[in-house]
């Protein structure tokens, strides 16, 4: 079974940095796009960053140049490096896997979320 477990969130001052980790099991990065989403109180969930099966990356415009998504295949872990954090980045961040191929194509898998709070 698929499990995605996020960690690394916390309380930081504006301008600071955090690195979020998503430990994955039961999922293969070669057949799944990996994503980070976030949801702030009273707002809709939004896609923050994607790393596709071919390692192409895309980002939400408001985090472009500040956030970096990456994978470590040996550790089966997805990361989101967040620099120059702003109070507007405050949200619960979720790791997501989306199957690209095979019988499970299109299926979504989600972690439990990790809270990021940026103080001003």
Image (cartoon, rainbow, N blue to C red):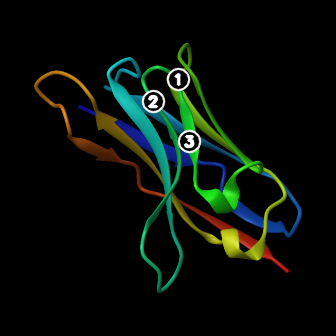
- Image quadrant assignment for residue 79: top right
Could you say whether the residue bearing mark 2 is in a helix, strand or loop?
loop
Could you say whether the residue bearing mark 3 is in a helix, strand or loop?
strand
Residue position marked by numbered label 3 in the rendering: 58
Residue extending farthest to the front is 61
Quadrant housing the C terminus? bottom right
Residue extending farthest to the top is 74
Q: Are the residues at dot 1 and dot 2 in contact (C-beta closer than 8 Å)?
A: yes
12 versus 53 height, above or below: below
Cα distance between the residues tagged 3 and 1: 10 Å
Residue at point 43%, 31% (across, down): 24
Residue at point 10%, 25% (across, down): 103
- Neighbours of disc 3 within 10 Å: few (<14), some (14-19), many (20+): some
Q: Nearer the viewer, residue 63 or 36?
A: 63
Residue at point 66%, 72% (across, down): 90
* Tag shown at residue 52: 2
Q: Are the residues at dot 3 and dot 2 in contact (C-beta closer than 8 Å)?
A: yes
Residue at point 47%, 81% (across, down): 43
Quadrant housing the N terminus? top left
Using residue 106 as the reference point, say whether residue 48 is left or right of it.
Answer: right
Residue extending farthest to the left is 103
Cα distance between the residues tagged 1 and 2: 5 Å
Cα distance between the residues tagged 3 and 2: 9 Å
* Tag shown at residue 55: 1
3 or 2: tag closer to the N-terminus: 2
**Residue 62: where, in percent of width, then height?**
67, 62
């Amino acid at each position: 079974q698929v499990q995605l477990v996020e960690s690394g969130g916390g309380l930081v001052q504006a301008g600071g940095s955090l690195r979020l980790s998503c430990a994955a099991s039961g999922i293969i990065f070669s057949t799944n796009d990996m994503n980070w989403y976030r949801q702030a109180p009273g707002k809709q969930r939004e896609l923050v960053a994607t790393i596709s099966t071919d390692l192409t990356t895309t980002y939400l415009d408001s985090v472009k140049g500040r956030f970096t998504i990456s994978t470590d295949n040996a550790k089966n872990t997805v990361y989101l490096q967040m620099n120059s954090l702003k109070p507007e980045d405050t949200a619960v961040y979720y790791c997501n896997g989306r199957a690209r191929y095979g019988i499970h194509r299109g299926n979504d898998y989600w972690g439990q979320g990790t809270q990021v709070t940026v103080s001003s």
